[in-house]
Image: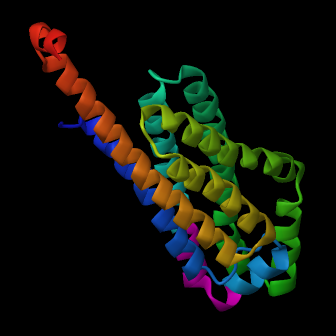
């Protein structure tokens, strides 16, 4: 079965997102949201922080594309879960991407003023109503991926793989919330495993559907 180019792009996006986040997390000196930690890391390890943030933001864009692909893939078998998971997943990831965009300005701020002033500026930005108000909504992305994992069972995804995808999404969310790198990495390893298995199940289901469609009616009756 030959997948269409959009399907290939979506599948690759879903699988590639987790490894990029893992690399970005390992590279970043800190994943803490605290202004003082961000300021210190950008002062002492500027290049590593910028690289880590860039990789994480790229991964988020890929994850959005992969989430849309997975939602479309399971839509025929489980439309309600596809819509709920797709909408929540994309919206939550967009919130995180917005937060990443805000943090992308931190390097410029830290590089242009003294350390104390930079920490104060970062703290004001991080504690602003626009940023703080959106923080809880970022969890919707994890919930959306969990729902899509459940829906993917309808296209043949093993329950353990669906569990890996869903549990991984929740675990990485906890990791970022607590600023613990090891938890984030474990969560995204599980997401990666679940994503690979979801792509495999989607390809198998598509191949089975294609084979059924091309089988002559007489042969189908004979079977």
Image quarter where the N terminus lies is top left
- The magenta region covers 43-54
Q: Position of residue 190 (x, y in %)?
A: 55, 62
Q: Look at the picture and state if 125 lies above or below 42.
A: above
Q: Residue at x 54, y 52 (%)?
A: 160
Q: Where is residue 124 in the image (x, y as percent from the top left)?
A: 88, 64
Q: Look at the picture and state if 97 lies above or below 107.
A: above
Residue 105 as seen in the image, left or right of residue 157:
right
Q: Look at the picture and state if 213 lies above or below 221.
A: below
Q: Which residue is drawn at 48% across and 31% down?
A: 154
Residue 98 as seen in the image, left or right of residue 179:
left
Nearer to the camera, 77 or 121: 77
Q: Which residue lies furthest to the bottom in this view?
A: 44
Asked if the stretch drawn in magenta spans residue 115, the answer is: no
Quadrant of the image occupied by residue 110: bottom right
Q: Where is residue 40 in the image (x, y as percent from the top left)?
A: 76, 86
Asked if the stretch drawn in magenta spans residue 53, the answer is: yes
Secondary structure that dominates the magenta span: helix
Q: Residue furthest front?
A: 222
Image quarter where the C terminus lies is top left
Quadrant of the image occupied by residue 205: top left
Q: Residue at x 72, y 72 (%)?
A: 109
Q: Position of residue 221 (x, y in %)?
A: 17, 9
Q: Is residue 15 shown to the viewer in this render?
A: yes
Q: Is residue 7 shown to the viewer in this render?
A: no
Say how many tags the image has: 0
Residue 102 as seen in the image, left or right of residue 24:
right
Q: Which residue is drawn at 89% across and 74% down?
A: 120
């Amino acid at each position: 079965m030959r997948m269409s180019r959009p399907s290939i792009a979506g599948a690759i996006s879903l699988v590639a997102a987790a490894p990029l986040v893992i690399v970005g997390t390992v590279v970043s000196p800190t994943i803490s949201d605290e202004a003082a930690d961000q300021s210190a890391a950008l002062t002492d390890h500027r290049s590593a922080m910028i690289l880590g943030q860039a990789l994480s933001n790229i991964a988020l864009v890929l994850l959005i594309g992969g989430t849309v692909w997975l939602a479309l893939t399971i839509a025929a078998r489980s439309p309600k879960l596809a819509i709920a998971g797709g909408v929540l997943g994309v919206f939550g990831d967009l919130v995180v991407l917005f937060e990443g965009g805000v943090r992308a300005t931190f390097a410029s701020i830290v590089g242009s003023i003294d350390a104390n002033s930079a920490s104060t500026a970062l703290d004001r930005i991080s504690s602003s109503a626009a940023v703080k108000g959106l923080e809880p909504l970022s969890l919707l992305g994890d919930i959306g991926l969990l729902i899509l994992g459940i829906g993917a069972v309808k296209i043949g995804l093993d329950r353990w793989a669906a569990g890996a995808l869903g549990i991984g999404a929740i675990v990485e969310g906890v990791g970022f919330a607590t600023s613990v790198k090891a938890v984030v990495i474990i969560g995204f390893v599980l997401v990666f495993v679940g994503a690979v298995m979801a792509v495999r199940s989607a390809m198998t289901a598509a191949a089975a559907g294609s084979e059924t469609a091309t089988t002559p009616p007489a042969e189908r009756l004979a079977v």
